């Protein structure tokens, strides 16, 4: 990569807004309405949702936003043959798709913050902005990086990512309840992305846990870029 194709930014932003952005708007509106309308019971009294409840709903919405922003990011262009037009002129495929991934991440940050702040304003709760932004960015790095890498191999990128995400969660629940895991299950839990370390409904990881989560996410993105670098494209696709 010799540099990001900045001249493509307006078109990328437009495509994200018209594609994943529409889904984010619908999911975000529903999530904000759900969070602001929830009630909790404390000491026999019904009260509005606390910050923890708001962040739990927002965390779910953020996960959906990540999938919307990255699903088919590379695979759709290959399946539809769009790469022939995109790379008809000399253009770095890794740089192009990395910039597209960054644009998707920005959209996820904006949508997630909008959901949390809108719901919080309606019920008078407080949202930790720094933790919200940091947690969303780290979650996008992991899950968004996974979909990015899978998208260089299969058009079912988001579906495979959901299966792996769910499998990791199920294994984590089994471990927390003390169920014995076999060697294969323990190995699978260890090699899957550490989704248990990220989430808006929990504190930001620090120290070794932060290095693990961030390092894993960076490795996923670098892996996707390496595949794009090595994968045959149309003639003249790369610089």
Image: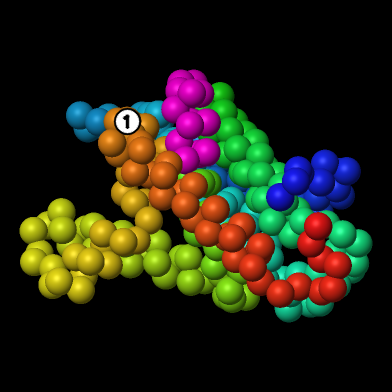
| Rendered residue at 15%/58% (across/down) | 175
Q: Where is residue 73 in the image (x, y as percent from the top left)?
A: 68, 62
What range is drawn magenta here?
Answer: 124-138
Q: In this view, does 166 lie above or below 138?
A: below
* Residue 9 part of the magenta-drawn span: no
Badge 1 element? loop
Task: Say if residue 169 shows up in the picture.
Answer: yes
Q: How is the image coloured?
A: rainbow
Q: Position of residue 82 (x, y in %)?
A: 83, 71
| Left or right for 238, reference 106 | right
| Rendered residue at 41%/44% (across/down) | 215
| Rendered residue at 71%/74% (across/down) | 232
Q: Main secondary structure of the magenta part?
A: helix
| 101, 107: nearer the viewer | 101
- The residue that disc 1 covers is 206
| 14, 78: nearer the viewer | 78
């Amino acid at each position: 990569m010799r540099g990001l194709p900045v001249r493509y930014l307006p078109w990328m932003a437009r495509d994200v807004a018209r594609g994943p952005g529409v889904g984010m708007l619908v999911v975000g509106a529903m999530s904000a309405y759900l969070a602001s309308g929830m009630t909790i019971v404390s000491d026999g009294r019904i009260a509005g949702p606390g910050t923890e409840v708001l962040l739990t709903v927002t965390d779910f919405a953020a996960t959906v936003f990540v999938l919307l922003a990255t699903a088919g990011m590379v695979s759709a262009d290959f399946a539809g043959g769009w790469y022939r037009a995109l790379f008809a002129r000399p253009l770095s495929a890794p740089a192009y798709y990395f910039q597209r991934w960054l644009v998707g991440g920005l959209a996820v940050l904006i949508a997630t913050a909008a959901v949390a702040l809108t719901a919080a304003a309606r019920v008078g709760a407080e949202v930790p902005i720094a933790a919200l932004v940091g947690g969303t960015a780290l979650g996008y790095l992991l899950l968004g990086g996974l979909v990015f890498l899978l998208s260089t191999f299969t058009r079912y990128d988001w579906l495979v990512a959901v299966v792996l995400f769910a499998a990791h969660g199920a294994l984590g629940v089994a471990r927390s309840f003390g169920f014995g895991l076999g060697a294969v299950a323990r190995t699978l839990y260890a090699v899957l992305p550490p989704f248990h370390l990220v989430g808006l409904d929990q504190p930001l990881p620090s120290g070794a846990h932060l290095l693990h989560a961030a390092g894993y996410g960076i490795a996923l993105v670098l892996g996707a870029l390496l595949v794009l670098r090595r994968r045959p494209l149309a003639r003249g696709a790369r610089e």
